[in-house]
Every structure is written in C-alpha cells, then in structure tokens.
Image (cartoon, grey):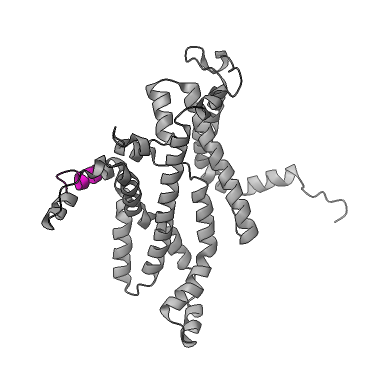
Amino acid sequence: MPGRRTATGKNASLLLIKRNKVLYLFILPAFLYFLIFSYVPMYGVQIAFKDFVASKGFSGSPWATPLLKHFYTFFSSVNFWGILGNTLKLSLYYIAASFPAAVILALMINEVKNVHFKKAVQNITYLPYFVSTVVLVGMINLFFSYNGLANNIGALFGAEPQMFLMKDSLFDDLYVWSGVWQATGYNAVVFIAALAGVSPDLHEAATIDGATRFQRIIHINIPAIMPTIIIMLIMTLGGVMNLSFEKVLLMQTDSNTAVSEVISTYVYKLGIQKAQYSLSTAVGLFNNAINLILLVAVNKISSKLSETSLW
C-alpha cells in the first residue's frame, strides 16, 4: 500500500528474530558450546606458524622463519609417509567395512515383521556402542592374549597358541572389526529412520506386480534411502583422517608401532610427551586441512553425480 513502510533487510531480520525468540533461546546452549569449545580455541592455531614458548604465550612467541618451518619439518621427516599411510589405510579400511555393514543391518532390521523381535535385535546391536573404548580394548586383550578365548577355542581343534597381539599384520583387522561390532548398531539408526519413511503403498504395488522381497529391497528401499546414504558417506569421508585416538593409543605396543602410528597419536607424542607444541599443532592443522579438502571435494563430486550434497 502507498505510504506504508515495509520491513526489509536488517529490520526484517530483527523482526524475524523477535518473532521466534523462544526458538533462538533453545539453540543458544548449542551455539555457546560450539563458540566456546570449537571456534575460540582456533585462536591457538597460530602456534603452528610460531616458535612457541609457553612462558611467552601466544603473542610473545616469535614467528617461525620461514613461516611454514614446522610443516616442512613434518613433511621432510622419515616418519611422514609411514604415518600418513597408516592413517589413510586404517581409516579407509574401517569405512569400507563399517559403512556398508550399517546399511545392510538397517535393511535387515526393516524386513523383520515381528515388532518385539525387531526391537530386541535393534537394542542388542545398539548396546555395544555404550561400551567404553578402554573396556573394548580390554576385551580385545582378553580374547586375543596368549591364554585368551581365541587360543582356547583353537586348542580344542588342535591349533597351537598364537601371539595375536604381537603380530603387525593383525593390528588393522583387530582395530577395524572390533569397531564394526561396536558401532554398526548405532550407525544403522539413521538408515532405519530413513526406511521408516518409505511408503507401504510402493511395496504393496510391487508385491502385486510379482516382485520378490529382495527385488523390493533393491528397487524400493535402497533408492528411497540413497540421499541419506550419500549425505552420511560425505560426512564420513570428510573425517577420513580422524581415527579413534584413544583406541589406537591403547592398542599400540612396541611391536606394532610401525603399523599403528597414526597422525593423532603422533600429535599426542609430540605435543604432550615431547612438548613440541608448534610442530604438533602444525601436524594437527595439516590433518584437519586434508579433511576439509576431502569434504569439499566429495561434496562437489556428489552434487554433480547425484544432485545430493551438504550444500
């Protein structure tokens, strides 16, 4: 209407905030959490570009010369390719084993018709997620030690006792498959929720047309949850360099260090044990930079191939 002033730009935003102030109050704790624990600590990233001295603090410590000195130190170290290779190998192995397992478990649970049995299976597969990392590694040590369950079962069939925990070749398998056992039920929850939104009418129509259960899974269920699968895969690949630091460190021994030393444990040893704060920060920053590049790249590829992406 002529002569009436409409709220635009900044006024419109303020009006929207005022109108939904209760909703903004709800998200305030989460906003403060990420601000305090995720964004404020980013101020310390400058340590990677300085010769940091704890007594001088952030501002008093001199800048490194050259500026990327600590990155060069890491890239030129004899451990660089071994640590990077261990990190990528272990992470990609875990993703290749755990991600399909969660999707398959969700599809299997979705096909169970008995409601009580369905809930029981879902609860049983979900429970291992609540086992702490320390307890899980303790279980691995008990099962695969020289006098453990694995050797006792092998002895029943005449097998000789094995030192499983001392073998480099078994470290990756123990790490990955214990993680699959622990996290598959938890990771499947998202896919189970997505499957709950599939229309029963599609299955009824397919059944009338003579489709088998397997055909309905392949042609109805999987396409229906494919956007969810892609989004979860993008987020998973975006954290490919982030392994479970506690689990790797607890499973690490002098005999398997060659295959178990990853970036997260290397940063811990440099920063906490050797007090090389600048170098450890540089290594950690490199690790996160790789994750960011992978996240953007995978998201870009996904948006072009499937039209499904995070942004």
Count numbered badges in the picture. Answer: 0
Of 278 and 259, the residue lying toward us: 259
Residue 271 falls left or right of residue 146: right
The answer to whether residue 67 of the structure is visible from this angle is yes
Q: Is 146 within the magenta?
A: yes
Q: Where does the image place residue 307, in percent across and percent down from the top left?
A: 63, 60
Most frequent secondary structure within the magenta stretch: helix
Of 130 and 297, the residue lying toward us: 297
The answer to whether residue 307 of the structure is visible from this angle is no
Q: Where does the image place residue 309, in percent across and percent down from the top left?
A: 60, 55
Q: Where does the image place residue 151, in percent across and percent down from the top left?
A: 16, 50
Quarter of the image containing the N terminus? bottom right
Of 255 and 249, the residue lying toward us: 255
Q: Where does the image place residue 275, in percent across and percent down from the top left?
A: 42, 20
Residue 15 falls left or right of residue 107: right
Residue sitting at 33 percent across and 49 percent down?
Answer: 173
Q: Is 127 within the magenta?
A: no
What is the quadrant of residue 184 in the picture? bottom left
Q: Relative to 277, does residue 110 appear above or below in the rendering?
A: below
What is the quadrant of residue 166 in the picture? top left
Residue sitting at 43 percent across and 81 percent down?
Answer: 212
Start and end of the magenta stretch?
Answer: 138-148
Q: Relative to 225, does residue 301 appear above or below in the rendering?
A: above
Of 134 and 118, the residue lying toward us: 134
